Amino acid sequence: MYDMIIVGAGPAGMAAAIYAKRAELKVLLLERATAGGQIINTYEVDNYPGIPGVDGFTLADKFSTHCDRLEVERKDGEVAKAEKDGAGWKLTLDGGEVLETKTVVIATGAANKKLGVPGEEELRGMGVSYCATCDGAFFRNKEVAVVGGGDVAVEDAIFLARLCKKVYIIHRRDEFRAAKSLVTALKACENVEFVYDSTVSSINGKNMTESVTVHNKKTGEDREIAINGIFIAVGIEPNSGTFEGVVEMENGWIKAGETCETSAPGIYAVGDVRTKQLRQVITAAADGANAVTSAERYLIELK
């Protein structure tokens, strides 16, 4: 029986593991893929205090190394089912293994949203990508498009502008939601063309992406832009399906405040998967610390 099982090893999950280990809890960190979550795909993290300009992979590695220093127990696996078991919880992994724990920290994060247009699925991996830092090098000196208007989309466009011959950034509005400093940096890139008030109608090509069709919402005109690749950054959706019916949710996001307590006693939600105003590495790490503090109080009450 564990004191705590943390489901997910992104910044929130690893921060929780560090705090749990320092609190001398018997803790297990579960991860279904590479530790680090979404930040391993981030070209540059410039807003984490004390480490300006660090790339996401390096920052994730620092978190992971810290966990290793504290000898955090880890296990590869994905939770298929969570159910109440007396005063604790029983987690069944996708391989059938059953784990018992007094508390659970859900740190499953979020995934990229899809456009849902013709050609997107058919050409995925053949010019359609959701990670500029992963795949950008394949499009060196070529023409690409970025879809979106938030921080990630603008950061992707800036990154790609350093590699590619031309970058089109397609946004459904006439101004960006991204931080002003990022937009200023993007506008300074001479090889970037802004396609405002437009949505993607289809991604075209046979064996590789060849063009994208965009629809201007104001003029009603359709335009086909020849490109070699398209990077989609239109937001995220929570990876919370496993816990549906176990904890209360709001449009898929797990309802939890600053204490990270959910509607289910002994279960906490941290990082991008919970309801919150700001989804950043710094707030994810803070969630991890808060969840363990809440769990410690809960465990004392259980005795």
Image (spheres, grey):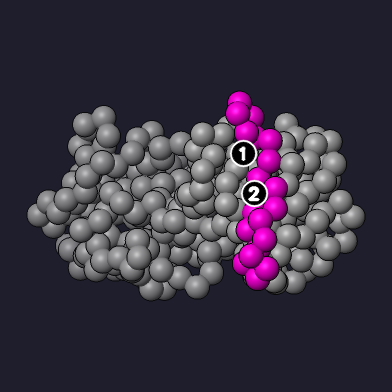
**As displayed, is residue 18 above or below residue 247?**
above
Amino acid type at image mark 2: Thr
- Vertical placement of 302 versus 29: above or below? below
Q: Residue at x 75, y 52 (%)?
A: 168
Disc 1 target residue: 204
Question: Residues under labels 2 and 1: Cα distance?
Answer: 8 Å
Q: Amino acid at mark 1?
A: Asn
Q: Position of residue 263 (x, y in %)?
A: 24, 68
Residue 281 shows in the view? no
Identify the element where label 1 is drawn: strand
Q: Is residue 137 left or right of residue 197?
A: right
Depth check: 255 or 171 in front?
171
Residue bearing mark 2: 213
Q: Residues within 10 Å of mark 2 (few under 14, many from 20)?
A: some
Instruction: Check if mark 2's residue and mark 1's residue have beta carbons within 8 Å.
Output: yes
Residue 280 part of the magenta-drawn span: no
Residue 216 magenta-highlighted? yes
Q: Secondary structure at mark 2?
A: strand
> Residue at point 64% right, 65% down?
220
Q: Which callout, 2 or 1, points at the residue further toward the start of the chain?
A: 1
**Which contiguous range is marked in magenta?**
205-224
Q: Residue at x 24, y 62 (%)?
A: 247
Q: Nearer the viewer, residue 102 or 36?
A: 36
Which quadrant: the N terminus? top left
**Percent of width and height locating residue 208:** 64, 29
Judged left or right of residue 187, residue 56 is left
